[in-house]
Amino acid sequence: MNTLKETFYTRNPKLTHLEQEIDTAISVMLESAKNKKALLFCGNGGSAADSDHIVGELMKGFVLKRPLPDALKTALIKDYDNGEFLANTLQQGIAAISQTHHSALNFAVHNDLHGDLIFAQQVLGYAPISGVVVGMSTSGNAENIINAFKVAKTQGLKTILLSGETGGKLKAFADIAICVPESETYKVQEYHLAIYHYICLMLESSLFDS
């Protein structure tokens, strides 16, 4: 894992001042995963796409194969005609949910409650099975993420912010704020991509690299 860290900061030298925040975020997310608690992700616009992207990296193999445990393989092979295919093809996942993806629910909340509550309502529902909420906002001022963080904190969930250089209003509601040294939206998002790929690599390595 030291090699992963060295490679990341060699490629992204302008993020070295965020090493402590990123390390802490990884530790908090790793603890959640080890406790079988889901990681929740939310964002708007390009950050909504990033939420989906992260979940795609976590829920199946990213750079590792993540083979199933032997006991599960044995059960699948024993119980089902295609058990060998399932046992040898499926991969272990890290429980993660993108809150941007539930269009029917989000439209219902927007229509029946309020548009700024689409993520907060999901955090409330997912809280018993979750450990962390990760919000991505380039400005740091997304009201729907602010409300999600408020609910998360009342439910005992950790909150992690990925934002631009100031962190905006969200910084006050984040347990961990990773504020990259840019303010222009696409430049902030480029840093976010590098950071969350690194986080995914570190989580995967910690959990599955034997």
Image (tube, rainbow, N blue to C red):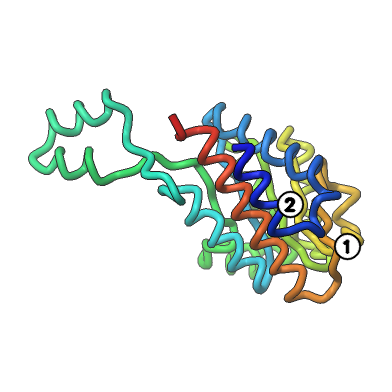
Q: In this figure, which residue is indicated by the disc labeled 1? A: 165
Instruction: Check disc 2: other Cα within 10 Å, few if <14, some if 14-19, many if 20+.
Output: many
Q: Residue at x 64, y 36 (%)?
A: 131
Q: In this picture, is 99 found above or below 103?
A: above
Q: Earlier in the sequence, mark 1 or mark 2?
A: 2
Residue 107 in the figure: left or right of residue 138? left
Q: In this picture, is 165 found above or below 89?
A: below
Task: Calculate the distance from the C-alpha at mark 1 to the C-alpha at mark 2.
Answer: 21 Å
Residue farthest left in this picture: 81
Q: Residue at x 61, y 45 (%)?
A: 4
Secondary structure beneath disc 1? loop
Percent of width and height locating residue 11: 69, 59
| Dots 1, 2 in contact, CB < 8 A | no
Residue 76 in the figure: left or right of residue 12? left
Mark linked to residue 148: 2
Quadrant where the image shows the C terminus:
top left
Depth check, front residue: 183 or 118: 183
Q: Residue at x 71, y 54 (%)?
A: 10
Depth check, front residue: 44 or 178: 178
- Badge nearest the viewer, 1 or 2: 1
Quadrant where the image shows the N terminus:
top right
Instruction: Check disc 1: other Cα within 10 Å, few if <14, some if 14-19, many if 20+.
Output: some
Residue 67 in the figure: left or right of residue 81? right
Residue type at mark 2: give it. Answer: Ala
Depth check, front residue: 57 or 7: 7
Mark linked to residue 126: none
Residue type at mark 1: give it. Answer: Glu
Percent of width and height locating residue 138: 78, 67
Q: Residue at x 86, y 63 (%)?
A: 181
Residue farthest top in this picture: 71
